[in-house]
């Protein structure tokens, strides 16, 4: 699995994230970011061109060295300066209350320990800061949920740890955030078990 995880999987993840159906969700999330931004799981840097002039700097946290290398090209074209941090979301190497915005886009599904990671995000946010998120997760329909629960054990090992069935709202609130805006929808032209979205904003 080492070669697959280190060399093949990063390219598969990048290809999946380039799905044109995801672009409007990604754009809305990045457009709301401001100040010092910490992006969790920056991947190949697809969000970097979308940050507006209200963003002072982007700190990109990413556990995959291969994806960081892929993101460096996108950083050259980005408006704000970008600093990459190789590390895990469960142990963010930043001081308490040091960033204004945390951004996650299709990231919480793959983090092994989602609640500790969210608690870390809350720790590094300044008072009045915001968590902006767009994530796929547990659907409301019983039949879709049945498929999500059934497929996740098979899907997770081949998809970089991706869980199809995480209850995103519950995870965020359990970690101590207050959700101030939330929209749920299915991504068009995407299998329902993979395409139920949670997009919104939360405060510490």
Image (cartoon, grey):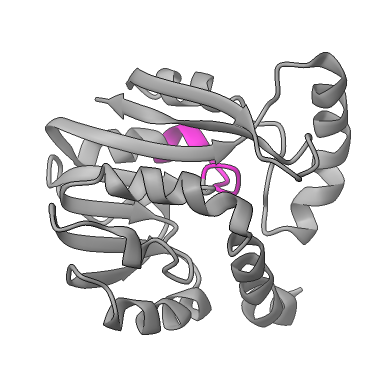
- List x then y, in percent, for residue 173: 42, 19
- Where 38 sits versus 100, above or below? below
Rendered-image quadrant of the C terminus: top left
Q: Quadrant of residue 102?
A: top left
User: Is residue 102 shown left or right of residue 97?
Assistant: right
- Where 146 sits versus 126, above or below? above
- Residue 113 in the magenta stretch? The answer is yes
The residue shown at (42%, 38%) is 133
Can residue 90 be seen here? The reply is: no
- Given residues 34 and 115, the one toward you in this image is 34
The residue shown at (63%, 65%) is 13
- List x then y, in percent, for residue 98: 12, 47
User: Is residue 78 shown left or right of residue 147?
Assistant: left
- Given residues 37 and 174, the one toward you in this image is 37
- Residue 134 in the magenta stretch? The answer is no
- Given residues 194 and 26, the one toward you in this image is 26
- Given residues 89 and 179, the one toward you in this image is 179
- List x then y, in percent, for residue 159: 73, 58
Rendered-image quadrant of the N terminus: bottom right
The residue shown at (67%, 59%) is 160
Write the start and end of the magenta stretch as one range: 108-117
The residue shown at (52%, 48%) is 107
Can residue 153 be seen here? The reply is: yes
User: Is residue 17 shown left or right of residue 49?
Assistant: right
Q: How many marks?
A: 0
- Where 176 sits versus 60, above or below? above
- List x then y, in percent, for residue 151: 86, 40
Name the chief secondary structure element in magenta: loop
């Amino acid at each position: 699995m080492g070669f697959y995880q280190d060399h093949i999987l990063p390219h598969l993840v990048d290809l999946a994230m380039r799905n044109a159906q995801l672009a409007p969700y990604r754009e809305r999330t990045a457009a709301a970011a401001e100040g010092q931004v910490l992006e969790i799981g920056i991947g190949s840097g697809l969000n970097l061109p979308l940050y507006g002039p209200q963003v002072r700097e982007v700190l990109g946290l990413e556990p995959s060295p291969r994806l960081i290398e892929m993101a460096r090209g996108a950083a050259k074209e980005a408006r704000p300066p970008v600093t990459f941090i190789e590390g895990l979301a469960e142990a963010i190497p930043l001081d308490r209350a040091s960033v204004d915005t945390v951004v996650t886009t299709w990231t919480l599904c793959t983090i092994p320990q989602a609640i500790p990671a969210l608690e870390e995000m809350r720790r590094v946010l300044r008072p009045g800061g915001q968590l902006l998120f767009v994530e796929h997760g547990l659907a409301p329909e019983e039949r879709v949920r049945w498929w999500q629960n059934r497929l996740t054990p098979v899907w997770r090992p081949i998809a970089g740890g991706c869980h199809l069935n995480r209850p995103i709202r519950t995870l965020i609130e359990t970690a101590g955030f207050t959700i101030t805006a939330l929209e749920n929808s299915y991504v068009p032209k995407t299998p329902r078990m993979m395409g139920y979205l949670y997009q919104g904003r939360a405060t510490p």
